[in-house]
Amino acid sequence: MESIGVLMTCPMSAYLEQELDKRFKLFRFWQFPQRAQFLKENCGSIRAVVGNATVGADAELIDALPKLEIVSSFSVGLDKVDLAKCKEKGVRVTNTPDVLTDDVADLAIGLCLAVLRRICECDRYVRSGKWKKGDYKLTSKFSGKTVGIIGLGRIGTAIAKRAEAFNCPVCYYSRREKPDCQYKYYPSVTELASNCNILVVACPLTEETRHIINREVIDALGPKGVLINIGRGPHVDEPQLVSALLEGRLGGAGLDVFEKEPEVPEELFGLENVVLLPHVGSGTVETRQEMADLVIGNLEAHFLSKPLLTPVV
C-alpha cells in the first residue's frame, strides 16, 4: 500500500501521522501553502483523505481529487465532510464512533460539576492567595438537578446514564421519541429547556440543528439554568449566549466547542460562571489512539477490498 496517496488535511495526531506514513504515501496538506498547485500536481495519486472535526473534505477538495475513493475522518461528527458530494462521486466515508463516547460523556459531567461548583474559579481563588482573606462563597449542588439532553444517541445516552448516578432526573429532545425509553421526552427544545436545570447539547451538527440554541431556548432555560455544549460550536447562537450570560439571563455555561474555533468571545473570559475548554472532548491518549487505529483500519479495509469497519457513506 506504500504507493497509495493519502492526504492528511491538518495536524491531528502524531501517532496517526506516523502510522499513516508507515503504510501509505502520506501528503501533509498543511505543508503546502500553494494548495491549488499542490492538488494539480498530485491529484492523480491521492486516493484517500484523512480529515477531522476542524478540516475535513468539502466539495471543492473532493472535486479536485478525481482518484479519491475514501474519506476517513478522525472524528465522530462529519459536518466538515460534504456527504452529498461524496455520495454523488461514489466516495466512501468513515468516522470514529463509539471509541470516544465515554470520554465525551465524562467531560460533559465534568463541565456540569465545574460550572455549578465553580471548580475552576475555586482553583484560581486558592492560587491567588484570596483564601487567606476568607472562605470562597457557596456554590450550587449538581446531584438531583434535572438534566435535559438534546440528542439521545450514543453520547447523549452515555451522559444520561452518568447523570442518573448523581440522582439527576433525565429528559430529552430528539427528532423522534425513542421507543422503550425511560426518560421523559419533550417535542421541542424550548419545552425541554423550560423543564430542566442543565441543558446538554449532544446532537450532530446539521442545517436543522445549527443555532438550535437560540435566544428563545436560552430564555426558557433561564437565570438559574446552565448550558453545556460538547457537540459543535455552531449549535449555539454565540452572540445570543454571550449577551444572556453578561445580562444574567442565563445562570452559567460549560463550553468545549465554539462557533469559530479557536476564536472564543473575549467577553466570556472574565465570567466565573463559565468554563471554557479547547475542544478536548475526546482528548485522552487512550481514545485518540483508538480513533487513529480506526482511521487506519478503515483505510486498510477499503484498499484490501474488505468491509469497512465504520461506514457512513
Image (cartoon, rainbow, N blue to C red):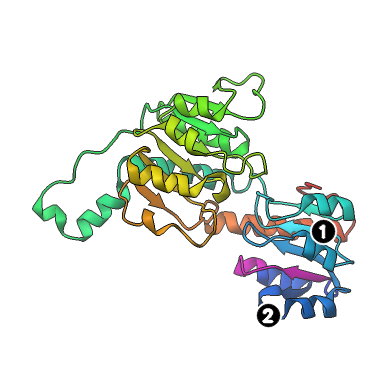
Question: Callout 1: helix, strand or loop?
Answer: strand
Q: Label 2 near label 1: C-beta < 8 Å?
A: no
Q: Quadrant of residue 66?
A: bottom right
Kindly identify the residue that appears in the image at 53 percent across and 47 percent down: 103
Amino acid type, label 1:
Ile
Q: Position of residue 111 (x, y in %)?
A: 42, 45
Kindly identify the residue that appears in the image at 65 percent across and 69 percent down: 10
Q: Which residue is mark 2?
A: 33
Kindly identify the residue that appears in the image at 56 percent across and 40 percent down: 202
Region of the chain picked out in magenta, as a range? 5-16
Asked if residue 84 is positioned above or below residue 170 in the image, the reply reads below
Residue 164 forms part of the magenta stretch: no
Count of numbered tags: 2
Q: How much space separates mark 1 and mark 2, taking CA atoms?
A: 24 Å
20 relative position to 158: left or right:
right
Q: Is residue 114 visible?
A: no
Asked if residue 144 is positioned above or below residue 2 in the image, the reply reads above
Residue 13 forms part of the magenta stretch: yes
The answer to which of marks 1 and 2 sits earlier in the sequence is: 2
Rate crowding at label 2 as few (under 14), some (14 to 19) or many (20 or more) other CA atoms within 10 Å: few
Asked if residue 42 is positioned above or below residue 248 in the image, the reply reads below
Amino acid type, label 2:
Pro
Asked if residue 195 is positioned above or below residue 245 in the image, the reply reads above
Q: Position of residue 251 (x, y in %)?
A: 35, 38
> What number is the disc on residue 70?
1
Kindly identify the residue that appears in the image at 84 percent across and 64 percent down: 63
208 relative position to 140: left or right:
right
Q: Quadrant of the N terminus?
A: bottom right
Report the front residue among 244 and 225.
Answer: 244
Question: Callout 2: helix, strand or loop?
Answer: loop
